[in-house]
Image (cartoon, rainbow, N blue to C red):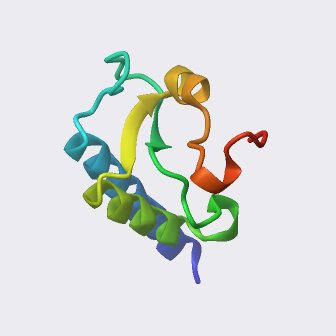
Amino acid sequence: MCDKAKRSIKAGLRNRRAILVIAMGGECEFCGSANRLEFHHTEPRKWVAAKVNQSTRQKMYEKEFLSGKLALACSDCNKRLGKPVSDNTKGKRQ
C-alpha cells in the first residue's frame, strides 16, 4: 500500500473517532473537561486493544458506545477510574 493510501486511511479513522467523540457529547462525563479525551469502558471488554488494528478498534468503540458500554473521559478521570472489574476478577489486582 502506498504512503498516500495509508495517510488517507489514518485520516478517515481520525474523522470517525472525532465523530464518535462528538456523538458522545464532546466532554468528559465525569468532570466536564474537553481536553485529552479518551474512551472509558464501563464494563470489562472482551478484546485487547494492542492485539487489534486501529480500524477494528474504532469499530469496537462504536459498537460499545451503541450498547452503552463506553463513556467519554478525560485522561485524568480515566486513570482515576481505572479498568472496570468483572464479577470473576473481583478481589484480584487489575
Residue shown at 58% from the left, 83% from the top: 1
Q: Looking at the rendering, in which quadrant would you find the C terminus?
A: top right
Q: Which residue is situated farthest in the right direction here?
A: 93
Q: Is residue 43 above or below residue 22?
A: below
Q: Is residue 44 above or below residue 35?
A: below
Residue shown at 36% from the left, 18% from the top: 33
Q: Which residue is situated farthest in the bottom direction here?
A: 1
Residue shown at 55% from the left, 53% from the top: 44
Question: Residue 86: image x %, image y %?
Answer: 58, 51
Question: Residue 4: image x %, image y %?
Answer: 50, 71
On screen, residue 13 versus residue 82, left or right, reads left
Q: 85 and 75: which one is in front?
A: 85
Question: Residue 51: image x %, image y %?
Answer: 69, 69
Q: 30 and 6: which one is in front?
A: 30
Q: 82 and 22: which one is in front?
A: 82
Disc tally is 0
On screen, residue 61 versus residue 1, left or right, reads left
Q: 1 and 24: which one is in front?
A: 24
